[in-house]
Image (tube, rainbow, N blue to C red):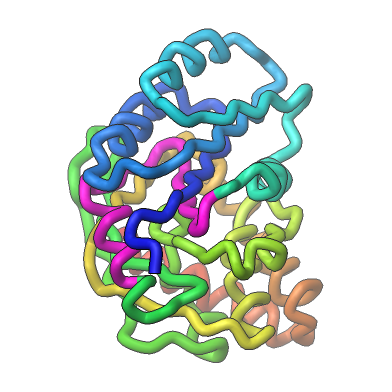
Amino acid sequence: MNNNPLISIIISYYKKKEYIKKTLNSILRQSYKNFELIFVYDQENKKDLKFIKNLLKKFKNTKLIINKKNIGVAKSRNLAVKFCRGKYIAFIDADDIWLKNKLKVHLLFMQKNNSNISYTSYGIINDKDKLINLRKVSNLIYYEKLIKNCEIGLSTVMISKKIKNKVIFPNLKTQEDFALWLKLMRNGYKFYPLNKVLSYWRKADNSLSSSSIQKISDAFKLYYNLENKNFIYSIYSVIVLAYNKINKIL
């Protein structure tokens, strides 16, 4: 076992200038240092590019991908995955924060369990970095449970390169990560929950994910088109999912 494997970290950036420095600093402060950063700039407007390039100078091992136009977070992450050289891949959104031992603790957990995909508990913070809630993961997760309530936060997920070719985010504006987790689980991949808070998810009112209409629309597409559920089941599941998400952030 390689006790010091390379970890590839993926970030897709779109209009997060207010938070991205904190996010990148939380990566720089990691106690585990053998990582590469795959950064996708997904703004058609390039006004933030100089600012981003200056921040990335602090990293020793970085790949900057500049999209000519905005292609969305799903396609941007799919593009980034192709450039990953690490034995493991970790994801973080451009406004979230990692605790300093996130990579170290998570890697040891995955190695111990010989896991291909794993995720952790996380805290929920507001625009001012104030902790407003905690999201604890289950001891055991399975498809029928996950489809009712997505407890998997993208910025907590780490995968093995063994399933790299299976990691293709569906082209949704929101819920794209939830859709991928369901697909992987439906195809027999076991998810290992780690009940330790190692990340902070930011509830930002101006984020795309805060658009209720968009999220409801994408959730219906997820159930009806991607998971092939019937119309009534899909409508019911969207309501249940919305209820669980509201409880999550209160």
Q: Is residue 98 magenta?
A: yes
In the foreground, 249 or 54: 54
Q: Picture coordinates of residue 228 (x, y %)?
A: 79, 82
Question: Residue 208 falls in which quadrant of the image?
Answer: top right
How far from the left and from the top, in percent, is residue 4? 35, 54
- The quadrant of the picture occupied by the N terminus is bottom left
Q: Number of marks in the image? A: 0
As drawn, 227 above or below 78: below
Q: What residue span does the magenta drawing correspond to?
A: 86-109
Residue 97 is inside the magenta segment: yes
Task: Tell me what residue is drawn at x 55 percent, y 91 percent.
Answer: 144
Q: State the image coordinates of residue 14 (x, y, percent, origin top left).
A: 58, 30
Is residue 102 placed above or below 18 in the rendered structure?
A: below
Identify which residue, 217 or 100, lies in the foreground.
100
Q: Quadrant of residue 183?
A: bottom right
Q: Which residue occupies 58% across, 60% down? A: 177
